[in-house]
Image (tube, rainbow, N blue to C red):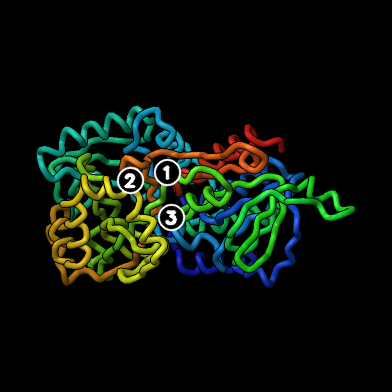
Amino acid sequence: MMGIRRGALLKAVYAAQPKLLKDTASRQLHSTYDVAIVGAGIVGLASARELILRHPALTFVLLEKEKELAVHQSGHNSGVIHSGIYYTPGSLKARLCVRGATLAYEYCEKKGIPYKRCGKLIVAVEQEEIPRLKSLYERGLKNNVRDLSIVDAKEIREREPYCRGIMALDSPYTAIVDWRMVALRYGKDFEEAGGAVVTEFEVSDIAMVKESPAGNPEGMKYPIAIRDKKGNEVQCRYVLTCGGLYSDRLSQISGCSPEPRIVPFRGDYLVLKPDKHYLVKGNIYPVPDPRFPFLGVHFTPRMDGSVWLGPNAVLAFKREGYHLYDFNAQDFADALSFRGLQKLIFRNVTYGIGEMYRGVFLGAQIKILQKYIPELSLSDVLRGPTGVRAQALDRDGNLVDDFVFDGGVGDLGSRVLHVRNAPSPAATSSLSIAEMVADEVESRFTL
């Protein structure tokens, strides 16, 4: 396992990737490629890497609307390598997570990316949670999660001296890592293999080339035109989109289905003050309550030595709205006009109000966290970072909990593949998702 001297090493790794952080103006952009990948989050970067490694003779371009790569969900997450406990046995999500964790550890070792296998305790604090905890244990075993065990109150204290619970599921195979560093390394692999990375290219249109200029056969060979809001254009044979928070809109502009719809949920974290870091050694998670749509607050140590507590889950008024008062009229209207969100809100009114209340009044959040670490007090925490989750919803208000691919019909639709939903733990599963995406690309397109 890698050492945890993070500060200097992180700077060195980030500094070694300057080409991934430049804007479009500094690049010589060719106009035609075999495959264009839209979206440079961790799933897009991993998929681009996998495709170019499989098909080195083809030309690939990765298009990203921001100045830098992996700055949204991939750069605003809890930084955990999950082991695969929670997911339905035999499901795609379970298989991808278990394999993805194995691949992630191997990749970090190979590339010299630091991580820390600090483990996870899923802690029952009430008797009624014990049957659900035991069911999780059975799920984990069926999913082939490594080294799982059930521990009692004494063993909880041995692993986490300040944590109190009556029973817990111990997952020592769980780890922490800087997922943005991993994502940037995927991008470096992609560039080193000959791929082009173009930033500040916000896709506004995906369409068939109307006609080929006289004497120029390229329009027939590269029949798809991708345009950005500045009037730049790239032509290609095939398109793969990994749009995260904008996956539904990318699907719509290419003539594919608008559903499932993406609804943004903001998660606000607290951070422990440095003199209280001793309270938490590894990940401490609650037993999930099936009555509620999200997991609940947890304790997460970070690679920089900090400790995050949370998050809550509240509707964001902007798809990339990381602050309470961030607002975008189109995003807000799209969300509230969607019948699926209306149904979800109606079914979870009390839960939603509670999440908003705890987001404003930290004492209420601390009260929940004290169930696990009674010594914690309001004076021990500060407001911390936030993230925005791209939650896919169907029209009946159900959270879409597995991976969704979408294409279309006709000249354009048959040449486009959209990764519509890549839910948590997409970072953990990124390399196994990339294998599946590349398989899907190869099955749909003639590369």
Q: Secondary structure at mark 1?
A: loop
Judge depth for marks 1 and 3 and give the one in front: 1
Q: Residue at x 32, y 55 (%)?
A: 336
Residue 39 in the image, given as x and y percentages of width and height: 55, 55
Q: Amino acid at mark 2?
A: Gly
Query: What residue would you read off at disc 2?
Result: 340
Give the image quarter of residue 151: top left
- Inter-mark Cα distance, 2 to 3: 34 Å
- Inter-mark Cα distance, 1 to 2: 9 Å
Q: Secondary structure at mark 2?
A: helix
Q: Would you call the spot at circle 2 few (<14 residues within 10 Å), some (14-19), or many (20 or more)?
A: many
Asked whether residue 92 is in view, the answer is yes
Q: Is 10 situated above or below 432?
A: below
Q: Earlier in the sequence, mark 1 or mark 2?
A: 1
Give the image quarter of residue 15: bottom right
Q: Is residue 431 left or right of residue 133?
A: right
Q: Earlier in the sequence, mark 1 or mark 3?
A: 3
Q: Is 132 situated above or below 232?
A: above
Asked whether residue 3 is in view, the answer is no
Query: What residue would you read off at disc 1?
Result: 260
